[in-house]
């Protein structure tokens, strides 16, 4: 999974970065940020549905990682530890807000434009069809398609059954297909 996020970055390398961060290395923090910013941002955005808040949580996550690194105990899943921090900060941010603000189509386009894991075709597909999806479907689709997480990992992040994640994902794909088929039909 890490290879999908940043080529060459695996759990051992992330663990070494966290160890160096605990020793005060800002270079290690920069390396960790570059390797993990895409899934951290995708999780924050899918939870908050508001680009400025997601960007704030992205940066707050790395500040929290810097502070918490001395207490980090490697269990072979450093990305899970990082995303747990992100999830907690996202939930905290949601509690601070009075109501959720859905992303506009333009905001989704901006959010997807710079994602290195998406091909141009994937960006077009996601941008054109986001409005057809419910928030839970959009969240699962982004975590899977943009960040490359497996369905089991998404279920763990969202604290919901794997069957729910799978059904929402497949429902989202069907909606996307219908939306694209509808757009591709010639108009009389």
Image (spheres, helix red, strand yellow):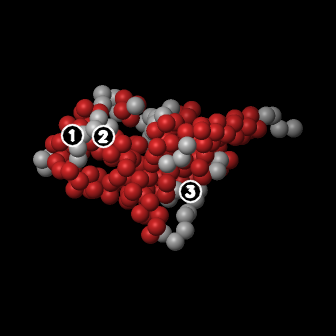
| Sequence order check, earlier mark of 2 and 3 | 2
**Residue 112 or residue 133, whichever sits in front:** 133
14 lies above or below 48:
above
Residue at position x 55%, y 68% from top?
Answer: 99
**Residue 78 or residue 124, whichever sits in front:** 78
44 lies above or below 169:
below
Q: Which label sits on residue 78? A: 2
Tell me if residue 26 can be seen.
no
Q: Which quadrant: the C terminus?
A: top right
Q: Which quadrant: the N terminus?
A: top left
Instruction: Name the residue furthest right.
Output: 188
Image side of residue 51 versus residue 79, left or right: right
Number of residues whose C-alpha sits closer than 10 Å to that of mark 3, classed few (under 14), some (14–19) or many (20 or more)? some
Image side of residue 17 versus residue 46, left or right: left
Image location of residue 42, percent across then percent down: 45, 46
Mark 2 vs mark 3: give the one in front.
2
| Sequence order check, earlier mark of 2 and 1 | 1
Mark 1 vs mark 3: give the one in front.
1
Mark 2 to mark 3 CA distance (whole Å): 30 Å
Q: Could you tell me which secondary element the residue under label 3 belongs to?
A: loop
Q: Which residue is mark 1?
A: 17
Residue at position x 20%, y 37% from top?
Answer: 16
Quadrant of residue 32 within the rendered picture = top left
111 lies above or below 150:
below
Q: Could you tell me which secondary element the residue under label 2 belongs to?
A: helix
Tell me if residue 175 can be seen.
yes
Number of residues whose C-alpha sits closer than 10 Å to that of mark 1, classed few (under 14), some (14–19) or many (20 or more)? many
Q: Which label sits on residue 103? A: 3
Image location of residue 12, percent across then percent down: 25, 32
| Sequence order check, earlier mark of 1 and 3 | 1
């Amino acid at each position: 999974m890490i290879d999908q996020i940043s080529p060459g970055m695996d759990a051992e390398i992330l663990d070494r970065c966290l160890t160096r961060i605990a020793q005060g290395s800002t270079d290690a923090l920069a390396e960790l940020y570059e390797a993990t910013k895409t899934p951290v941002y995708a999780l924050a955005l899918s939870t908050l549905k508001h680009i400025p808040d997601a960007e704030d949580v992205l940066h707050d996550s790395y500040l929290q990682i810097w502070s918490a690194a001395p207490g980090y105990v490697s269990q072979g899943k450093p990305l899970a530890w990082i995303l747990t921090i992100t999830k907690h900060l996202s939930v905290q941010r949601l509690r601070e807000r009075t109501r959720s603000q859905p992303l506009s189509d333009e905001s989704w386009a901006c959010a997807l434009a710079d994602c290195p894991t998406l091909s141009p075709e994937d960006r077009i597909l996601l941008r054109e069809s986001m409005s057809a999806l419910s928030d839970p479907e959009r969240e699962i689709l982004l975590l899977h398609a943009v960040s490359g997480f497996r369905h089991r990992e998404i279920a763990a992040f969202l604290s919901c059954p794997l069957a729910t994640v799978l059904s929402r994902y497949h429902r989202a794909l069907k909606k996307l297909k219908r939306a694209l088929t509808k757009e591709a039909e010639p108009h009389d």
